[in-house]
Image (cartoon, rainbow, N blue to C red):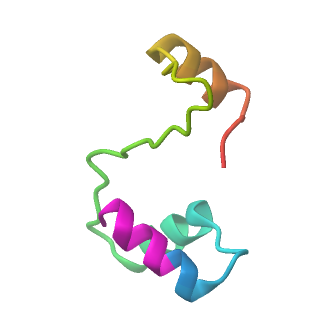
Amino acid sequence: MSGQGCRRYQSIRGDNFDYIEWLRQLSEGFNDINFSRIDVAVDVKDDTVPDMIKIIEYVEKEKYV
């Protein structure tokens, strides 16, 4: 889904929507599903975009939503 599609789906489902749970349920429902990529959106507050090493550190520390 596009970013707009994800936001629309989330707004329909409600504020407590859990993408991780949704992906798990989706993958259990189909035997041949394959996620070839996941796009990451980063909100920046001070016009600096974190480099890949910083993003990896955030993921390892589970600092994501």
Q: Residue at x 66, y 41 (%)?
A: 64
Measuring from the top left, give residue 3's x and y in whole percent. 37, 60
Give the percent coordinates (x, y) of residue 58.
65, 26
Is residue 28 visible from the viewing direction of this image? Answer: no
Q: Is residue 3 visible?
A: yes
- How many numbered badges does the structure rendering display? 0
Q: Magenta stretch containing residue 8, yes or no? A: yes
| Left or right: 10, with 30 as reference point | right
Q: Position of residue 42 (x, y in %)?
A: 51, 37
Front position in the image: 16 or 36: 16
Q: Of 21 and 13, which appears nearest the observer?
A: 13
Q: Is residue 19 magenta?
A: no
Magenta span of residues: 1-9
Image quadrant containing the N terminus:
bottom left
User: Which residue sits at x=30%, y=63%?
Assistant: 2
Left or right: 35 as drawn, with respect to 51: left
Q: Is residue 42 above or below residue 31?
A: above
